[in-house]
């Protein structure tokens, strides 16, 4: 199969193999799968992820503004509705099980990694078009599905005793896999309407930078707890 016949997401990922591996096989991700991630690191990640989701909702609002037809507006509106009325509620409920309230998370200062990633996504959407915006979001939306599946397979029967089992199962679930598949198919449709061979170099760089920023988001979680000094 020629490269141009592959789904857009596969072409983007294939052009950024090193960055994709650094993101999906990050030490934070491996520690999630092994159940060895310090709980304080996970809580720090969850709090920043709450703040990220707020900007993610704004990205869907921007998508509606950038839409070229009513179908794209409807899709953006559905995404925004799902984000603020479903996903945020699920995240808050999940975080409550880790002893974190919504008020506490809303009061958190944004970490540098959160600022860098969310503003990059919004900037690409503002400066570019709907395709640029969704390419910037793809490492998050589709990447988490890949990570969830890989961790579930890695854990196998041991997943039952993993303290991060619920998080892993959420992203390995059939429901989330469908979300990721829909996003990949939407990228293909956007490319048909708005793209062409000349767009790929710029889209690859957007995807590469978004993937790097995803890895930095994991690293932020690890760095939130200082290492114990060696005596």
Image (tube, rainbow, N blue to C red):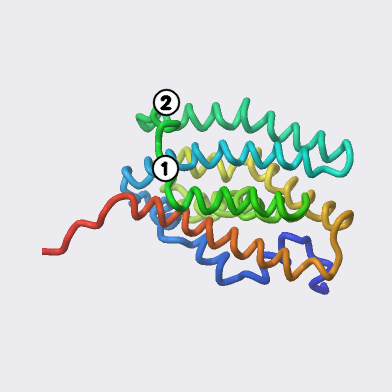
Residue at horizontal 79 percent and vertical 72 percent from the top: 3
Q: Which percent across, then down, holds residue 211?
A: 58, 60
Closer to the camera, 60 or 8? 60
Whether 191 is drawn above or below 171: the answer is below
Residue at horizontal 84 percent and vertical 52 percent from the top: 189
Crowd tier of the residue under label 1, counting other residues whose Cα lies within 10 Å: few below 14, some 14–19, many 20 or above: some
Q: CA distance from mark 1 to mark 2?
A: 23 Å
- Which residue does the numbered mark 2 point to in the structure image? 103
Closer to the camera, 32 or 70? 70
- Which residue does the numbered mark 1 point to in the structure image? 164
Residue at horizontal 17 percent and vertical 60 percent from the top: 229
Using the rendered view, name the quadrant where residue 74 is placed: top right
Residue that lies at the very extreme toward the left in this rendered image = 231
Left or right, 199 with reference to 93: right
Q: Quadrant of the C terminus?
A: bottom left
Closer to the camera, 186 or 5? 186
Q: Quadrant of the N terminus?
A: bottom right
User: Disc 1 on helix, strand or loop?
Assistant: loop
Whether 19 is drawn above or below 109: the answer is below
Residue at horizontal 60 percent and vertical 54 percent from the top: 120
């Amino acid at each position: 199969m020629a490269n141009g016949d592959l789904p857009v997401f596969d072409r983007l990922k294939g052009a950024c193999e090193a960055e994709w591996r650094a993101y999906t096989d990050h030490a934070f991700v491996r520690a999630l799968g092994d159940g060895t991630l310090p709980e304080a690191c996970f809580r720090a990640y969850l709090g920043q992820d709450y703040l990220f989701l707020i900007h993610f909702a704004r990205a869907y609002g921007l998508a509606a503004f950038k839409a070229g037809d009513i179908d794209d507006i409807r899709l953006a509106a559905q995404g925004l509705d799902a984000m603020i009325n479903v996903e945020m509620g699920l995240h808050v409920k999940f975080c409550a099980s880790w002893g974190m309230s919504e008020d506490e998370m809303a009061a958190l200062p944004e970490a540098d990694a959160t600022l860098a990633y969310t503003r990059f996504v919004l900037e690409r959407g503002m400066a570019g078009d709907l395709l640029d915006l969704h390419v910037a979001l793809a490492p998050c939306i589709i990447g988490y599905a890949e990570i969830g599946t890989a961790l579930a397979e890695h854990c196998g029967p041991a997943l039952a005793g993993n303290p991060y089992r619920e998080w892993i199962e959420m992203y390995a679930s059939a429901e989330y896999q469908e979300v990721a598949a829909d996003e990949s198919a939407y990228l293909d449709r956007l490319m048909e309407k708005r793209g062409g061979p000349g767009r790929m170099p710029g889209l690859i760089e957007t995807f590469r930078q978004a993937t790097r920023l995803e890895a930095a988001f994991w690293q932020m979680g690890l760095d939130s707890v200082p290492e114990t000094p060696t005596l």
